Image (cartoon, rainbow, N blue to C red):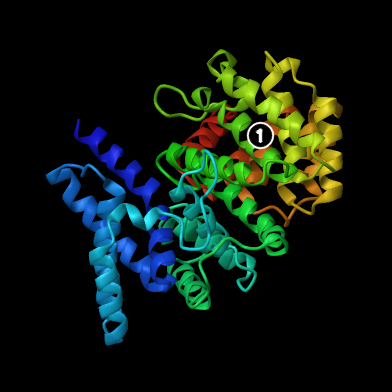
Amino acid sequence: MERTTDVIIEDLLRRNAPQVLGALVRRYGHFDPAEDSVQEALIAAAEQWPRDGVPDNPRGWLIRVASRRLTDRLRSDEARRRREETAAALTPADAFVAPPPGEGATGPGRAPSEDDTLTLLFLCCHPVLSPAAQIALTLRAVGGLTTAEIARAHLVPEATMAQRISRAKRTLRGTRFRRPDAPDLDQRLGAALQVLYLIFNEGYTATAGPDLTRTDLAREAIRLTRAVRRLLPHEGRVTGLLALMVLTEARTPARTGPDGELIPLDEQDRALWDRTAIVEGTALAEEALAQGPAGDYQLQAAVAALHDEAERAEDTDWPQILALYDLLVRRTPDPAAALGRAVAVAMVDGPRAGLAAVDTLAGTVEPRFRLDAVRGHLLERAGERAAARAAYRAAADGTLSEPEARYLRVRADRLDP
C-alpha cells in the first residue's frame, strides 16, 4: 500500500510540476529562481504528503509553497518583494492558472494549465538556446527528469549537465512568458517535437537503472504531444510524432516477462498488444501522411504501423519497411535510422547483406552498444556463434540499462560452446 501511495504522489508531482512552473513564470517572470522554487516545493510535497495526506488541490498547494519560496528569493528588491508578496497573498491559487490579462481564453477543450505547459515547452525551445540546451532544459522543466537522468541520457557527467541547464535558465532571464507568434512558432516546433520524442524514448526504454520502462515519462510525452496537436491539428510532423508514440506504446504490455526481462519484438505475444491504441495510431499515421510531404516522424510512424499490423512476426511486410527506411535515410543523417534500415536489409536480403550495411555505420551510432547488439543478432542469424557471442557481450558491457544487459548476456550465454 505504501508503494502505491508513493507512486500516486510521484505521478501527481510530475504531472503538476510543469503547470506550477508555468504559472509562476507567467505571474512573476524570473525563470531561473522560479524553477528552483518549484523544485523546493516538490521536495516539500514529497516529504509532507506521504505523512499528512495529499491536499484536496495539489496544484494549488504547490503554487502557494513555490510562490512563498520565490518571493523569499526576491527579497533583495524591496519594492518588488512587497508587490509580489501582496499579489501572492491576495490571489487565489486557482487564479494562477487563469489566462493572463490580454491573452483571452485558451479555447474550447483546452485547460489553462495545459496552455501554460505548452507555453513553457516553447519557452524552453527558445531560439537563443543551443539545441543541446533546449533539450536539457525541457527534459528538466517540462519532462520532470532529474539532472542525473538527463546527464545519463546524454552520456555526460552530472556536473556538466547541471552547468548546461543553469546557463540555459540564465539565458532566458527576462524573456516574456507567452506563446510564440506564428513565424517563431514554426521555428521552435522542430526542437519541441525532438524533445518530446526524447522524453518518450527515455520512458519507453530507460537509458539506465533496474527497470526497462518508465511508463510515467512515456505517457507524459504522449499527453504533451496530444496537447501540441490540439494547438496545431493540421501539422503533419505533430500528427506523425503522436502516431509513432501511440503505435510504439501499444506494444508495452508484451515487452517484458514476469520478472521484468526484456522480450524482443519478434518474440512478443502480440495478443497482449493494445489493439485500441493500434487502431488509433494507424489512423493517425494515415492522416499524417495526408497532411503534407512525408517527414521523419511520418515515415517512422508508417514503419511502426506495419510492425503493429502484422499478426505474427513472420507476417511483417519487410520489403515495404525497407522502402520506407530508404526514404528516411535519404532525408536525415540520423544513424539510428540507418541502423533500422540495416535490420530491414537483413530481413529482406539476408544477414550477410545486413552485416555489410552495419559495417558502414561503425563509429557513427551512439550509444555504441546499439550497433553491437544488432551486429550480434545478425551474426547469430548468419551462424557465426563465436563472433555473435563477443558482440552480445560487448553490447551488454556498454549499456547502463540492467534489463538490456541481462537480455544481451543471456543471448551470449546461449551461444557458449
Q: Nearer the viewer, residue 262 or 297?
A: 297
Residue occupying the point 79% across, 32% down:
344
Find numbered disc 1 in the image and state the secondary structure of the residue it sits on: helix
Q: Position of residue 39 (x, y in %)?
A: 32, 61
Q: Is any part of residue 352 visible from this angle?
A: no
The amino acid at mark 1 is Ala
Residue at 73% across, 63% down: 183
Q: In percent of the image, x 33 and y 48: which residue is there?
A: 13
In the picture, the quarter occupied by the N terminus is top left
Return the x and y of residue 275 as percentages of the image width and height.
59, 17
In the depicted structure, whether residue 39 falls above or below residue 354: below
Foreground residue among 264 and 55:
55
Residue 308 vs residue 314, the one in the foreground: 308
Question: From the viewer's perspective, is 141 left or right of 384?
Answer: left
Q: Is residue 341 left or right of residue 101?
A: right
Q: Residue 146 is drawn in which quadrant?
A: bottom left
Q: Is residue 103 visible?
A: yes
Q: What residue is shown at x 79% (from left), y 27% (from top)? A: 347
Residue tagged 1: 243
Task: Give the quadrant of the C terminus.
Answer: top right
Q: In the rendered image of this protein, does residue 415 appear above or below residue 173? A: above
